[in-house]
Image (spheres, rainbow, N blue to C red):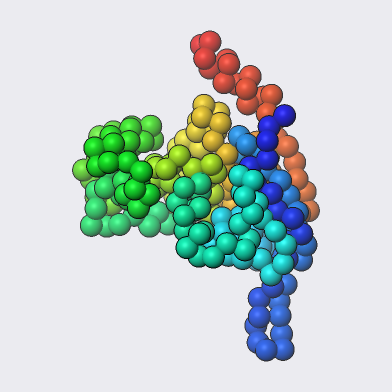
């Protein structure tokens, strides 16, 4: 039985629109994600998808409730502690890649490792190149973002998110700004990371095809889980990996 990597318990999120008016985004939500799951979160605009993702990653705090990441309670952590946890345990991928325009691909992927400070310059550069190889960007080491297509920029962003070997990858509409071909390439990369490396992935998406190709789909309506469907079991994951190993 896979262990739990992320747990949310009785999460409530309210926004103060004025002194007298508060809007409830998430009324009371609990869920668990196991190590190695590939989860797609869907729902109409305003259903609380991105808010939920940011709470999972410690970028936003719930009004009440608790979040555990890798067995560690993160709800009450201050910003300095959360910066450390995010750098060490969480990889973020957004709709817009947020690459630094003045730096090339290797330098952009190197940034989280430089902040982390656990590797020397040689080790950082070697790992950055290895990650770019993994996302099929081996010929673009010295290219700056302006010299890359949208899909290529997103692949560099995924490599950057993997830099510090995160426990969990969180994606907020990672294919939302891409054409269908580039979006499919990004999906295939996520799928390969999940199947071959057992990387835990949680993605918020409006892309129905993407969502239905994940291992588990959670559908939100008005901040509540309307459905939570397992599309692929953990046994399926391991069987797929074994078949690939034998081929």
Q: Quadrant of the N terminus?
A: top right
Determine whether 241 is above or below 106 in the image: above
Is residue 243 toward the left or the right of residue 116 in the image?
A: right
Q: Residue at x 40, y 54 (%)?
A: 97
Is residue 156 visible in the rendered structure shown here?
Answer: no
- Residue situated in front as seen by the camera: 90 or 143: 90
In the image, residue 145 above or below residue 136: below
Q: At which x and y percent is residue 240?
A: 60, 21
Residue in the picture at 68% in, 28% down: 234
Relative to residue 125, is residue 104 depicted above or below?
below
Q: Residue furthest left?
A: 142
**Horizontal relation, residue 182 to residue 146: left or right:** right
**Residue closest to the far bottom:** 19
The image quadrant that residue 198 belongs to is top right
Residue occupying image coordinates x 66% and y 62%: 48
The residue drawn where x is 54% and y is 65% is 78
Q: x, y percentage for residue 68?
A: 65, 51
- For residue 238, side relative to residue 135 (left or right): right
């Amino acid at each position: 039985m896979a262990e739990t990597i992320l747990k949310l318990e009785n999460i409530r999120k309210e926004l103060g629109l004025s002194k007298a008016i508060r809007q409830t985004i998430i009324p009371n939500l609990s869920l668990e994600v196991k190590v190695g799951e590939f989860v797609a979160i869907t729902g109409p605009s305003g259903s609380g998808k991105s808010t939920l993702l940011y709470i999972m990653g410690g970028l936003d705090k719930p009004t009440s409730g608790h979040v555990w990441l890798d067995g560690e309670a993160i709800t009450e952590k201050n910003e300095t502690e959360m910066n450390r946890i995010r750098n060490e345990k969480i990889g973020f991928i957004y709709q817009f890649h947020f690459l630094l325009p003045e730096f090339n691909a290797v330098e952009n992927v190197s940034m989280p490792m430089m902040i982390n400070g656990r590797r020397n310059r040689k080790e950082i550069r070697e790992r950055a190149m290895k990650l770019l190889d993994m996302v099929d960007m081996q010929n673009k080491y010295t290219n700056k973002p302006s010299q890359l297509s949208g899909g290529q920029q997103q692949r560099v962003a995924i490599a950057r998110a993997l830099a510090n070997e995160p426990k969990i990858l969180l994606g907020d509409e990672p294919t939302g700004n891409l054409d269908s071909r580039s979006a499919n390439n990004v999906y295939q990369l996520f799928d390969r990371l999940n199947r071959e490396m057992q990387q835990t992935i949680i993605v918020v998406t409006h892309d129905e095809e993407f969502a239905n190709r994940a291992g588990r789909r959670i559908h939100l309506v008005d901040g509540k889980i309307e459905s939570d469907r397992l599309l692929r079991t953990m046994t399926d994951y391991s069987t797929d990996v074994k078949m690939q190993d034998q081929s």
